[in-house]
Image (spheres, rainbow, N blue to C red):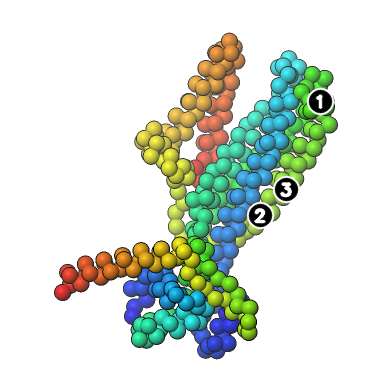
Amino acid sequence: MAEFTDHFTCDPDADLGDPVALAGEFADELGTSFALSAALLAFLALALAGILVSLRLVSLLPLRAADLGTGDTFALLTSAVAGQVSLVAGGLGLLRAARLHGRRTIPRREATVLARRAGIGLAAGAVTILAFPAMQSYRAPADAIGVAGHPAGWWWPLTSVLGAAAIVAASPADVRAARLRPQASGESGDVLVDLGPLRPIAAQISGGSVNRLAFVLGAGLTIVISLAGIAAHDPYDGILRGLLEGGAFLGTYVILGRYLGIRH
Amino acid sequence: MDAEQLKGHLDGLVLAVIDGEPQHGYAVIEALKTRSQGRLNLPEGTIYPALHRLERNGLLASQWSVTGRRRRVYRLTAKGERELGMRRAGWRDFATTVEAVLA
């Protein structure tokens, strides 16, 4: 505004252009800025929440399956799946934002993908954080690992509060991005575009097909986890977990892949 | 001159008029007009977005003048100088090639 005021002082008859076009350009630039910052803030919040969740998971290591009730098992599974969804959504959001960084405006479809990835990441992150208080083990089992000599439990509520606070703090940015999106036309890429320098390798593995890439990754996940179980002399558990992980990965890809702009 | 013909060259033109002497937006428009002998009379709605884009990309830096009227003055950064050098070399190459064919 100050810059234009100065210009009008130099040239009172200056023509800045069609007001509607200028307003549209401004809205597109603002929408672009909102979308990029939403993706970045979501990732930062999820990174913090992820560290806190990981600390809690580590403290639960002494627990055995027999110690867990049905509710505990369900909560752990929920947090495991939701946690991975938030990691992938938030991470892909950051990758896309990094690729689009510096552009004055981005197409509406790109902004939509960014807002969705941030939103799904934050929602899944919230489910991950909230799953823990649902566990009976949340009330500090005697053999859970403590921190710095202090028994586990006193810092568990703190991790929930801090993780939830980070997610809540990042949410308004995503709402703002969803409400004001650029109107510029253009396509948004799929996940192969997000991979940047790894794209040639991914294209070689998948033949350029995102579906094939997802299948290869899901199968790879199943194999790696199964082998880890076999190496730990627990083949049945390893194979079962491998199949569950691979299945969850592919199921999530089918359900959310198009919505998150991973595939067209 | 048809505005379409300027597409792709506008950034280089703006960098060239700012090269050597920091300018504010109005001065950039006037310099373009003067140096092109009136052939380049670009609207403010074209120049200011270009200035802001070049600044965001690190080719220009701006600061508000501290004396007199509140005025935003742009200057070339080191990156902008390198970019301008590349554009000048690229243009000379292009012009020489086209001239050789059209002549």
On the question of residue B41 being in view, the answer is no
Quarter of the rendering containing residue B94: bottom left
The chain carrying label 3 is A
Q: Residues within 10 Å of mark 2 (few under 14, many from 20)?
A: many
Residue at 84% over, 31% down: A154
> Relative to A205, is A20 above or below?
below
Of marks 1 and 3, the one in the foreground: 1
Residue A119 rendering spot, x and y as whole percentages? 63, 47
Query: Which residue is at the front of the view, A111 or B50?
Result: B50
For the residue marked with disc 1, what is the amino acid? Gly
Quarter of the rendering containing residue B100: bottom left
Of marks 1 and 2, the one in the foreground: 1
What is the spatial separation of the Cα atoms under label 2 and label 3, in whole angstroms? 10 Å
The chain carrying label 1 is A
Residue B90 rendering spot, x and y as whole percentages? 31, 65
* Image mark for residue A149: 1
**Residue that extends furthest to the top in the rendered view of this protein:** A233
* Image mark for residue A168: 3
**Residue that extends furthest to the bottom in the rendered view of this protein:** A12
What is the spatial separation of the Cα atoms under label 1 and label 3, in whole angstroms? 31 Å
Upstream in the sequence, badge 1 or badge 2? 1
**In which quadrant of the rendered image does the N terminus of chain B lie?**
bottom left
For the residue marked with disc 2, what is the amino acid? Ala
Upstream in the sequence, badge 2 or badge 3? 3
* Image mark for residue A176: none
The residue that mark 2 highlights is: A173
Callout 2: SS: helix
- Left or right? Give the position of A204 relative to A101: left
What is the spatial separation of the Cα atoms under label 1 and label 2, in whole angstroms? 39 Å
Q: Residues within 10 Å of mark 1 (few under 14, many from 20)?
A: few
